Image: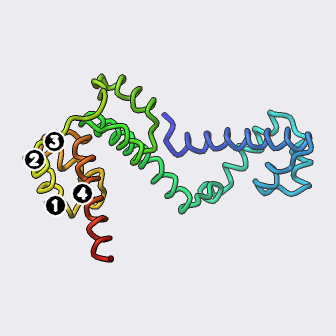
Amino acid sequence: MESPSIKFKKELSRTFSRMLTLSSTASRQGELNISNGIGFTSEQVMQIESLSSDQLDSVAEKYIHFAKVFEFISIDNVLLANILNLVSSDADDAKLIDEMLTRGACGNMMREFFKFRSTQVANRRILLNITPINGRITHLTLEDEEAIYKSWMANIDIEDVRFRMIAVNEETGISLAHIYRSVKELDRNKINSSVKHCA
C-alpha cells in the first residue's frame, strides 16, 4: 500500500505534466502567458515544445522526485485566508437564509440583508415548504410590541442585527417579519426624536 506522501508526489507529477502540456500547446499558438506565469525561460519553452507527451510525463516525474515539494507549491496565505473566509461566509449565509425564512422573515428583510429578489425568496420558501406570506402582515398587539421592545433591548450586546432579531424571535415567538417591522419603527422614532432635538 502506497504511503500518502508517495501518492501526493504522484498526483503532483501528473499535475505538473498537464501544466507542461498546456504551456507547450499555448506557446505553439503564440500565447506565452502560461509559460511566463509558471516561470519558464524562452529556452525551456522551446525545449518543452520539442518533447512528446511521454517525455513530458518523464520530465514531470523526475522534477517532482528531485524538487523540494513544498517549494514547488507556493501558497499565498493571505489570498487563501480571504478565499476560505469568503467561502465559509457564503456557507453560513446559506444556512442563515433558510433559518430566517423558517422563522417568518419577509421579502423586504431578505432584500436588505441578503440582496434577495422576490422570486428568490419565493423559490426558497417553496423548497423549504414554507407557506408564503400573502398581502400585508397583520398588526401587532400592544403586548407584542412591548415584548419585542424588551427583548430587543435585552439583546443589545448582539452586534449582528440578524442574529439579534433571531434572539428576539426565540424569546417572544413572534415572527421575524413582525420583529423587522417593529424594529424599523423604533429606528424611525429615534431619528424623528433626534431631528426634533436638533431643531
Q: Disc 4 vs disc 1: which is toward the camera?
A: 4
Q: Secondary structure at mark 4?
A: helix
Q: Tell me whether the residue at label 2 lies in contact with that at label 3, contact meaning CB atoms closer than 8 angstroms.
A: yes
Residue assigned mark 1: 153
Q: Nearer the viewer, mark 1 or mark 3?
A: 3
Q: CA distance from mark 1 to mark 3?
A: 18 Å
Q: Residue furthest bottom?
A: 198
Could you tell me how far apart the alpha carbons at marks 2 and 4 are, in whole angstroms?
14 Å
Name the element at disc 1. helix
Q: Secondary structure at mark 3?
A: loop
Q: Distance between the Cα atoms at labels 4 and 1?
A: 11 Å
What percent of the width, then of the height, locates residue 40? Answer: 82, 55
Q: Quadrant of residue 54?
A: top right
Which residue is identified by label 3? 140
Q: Which mark is residue 15?
A: none
Q: CA distance from mark 3 to mark 4?
A: 14 Å
> Observer-nearest residue: 121 or 94?
121
Q: Amino acid at mark 3?
A: Leu
Q: Amino acid at mark 1?
A: Met
x and y, in percent, of residue 61 in the image: 71, 43
Q: Which mark is residue 142?
A: 2
Mark 2, Cα crowd under 10 Å, few <14 / some 14-19 / many 20+, is few
Residue 155 vertical position relative to residue 56 in the rendered view, above or below: below
Mark 2–mark 4 contact, CB under 8 Å? Answer: no
Q: Residue at x 67, y 55 (%)?
A: 67
Q: What residue did someone put label 4 on?
A: 186
The amino acid on which the numbered mark 2 sits, given as a three-letter code, is Leu
Distance between the alpha carbons at the discs numbered 1 and 2: 17 Å
Sequence-first tag of 4 and 1: 1
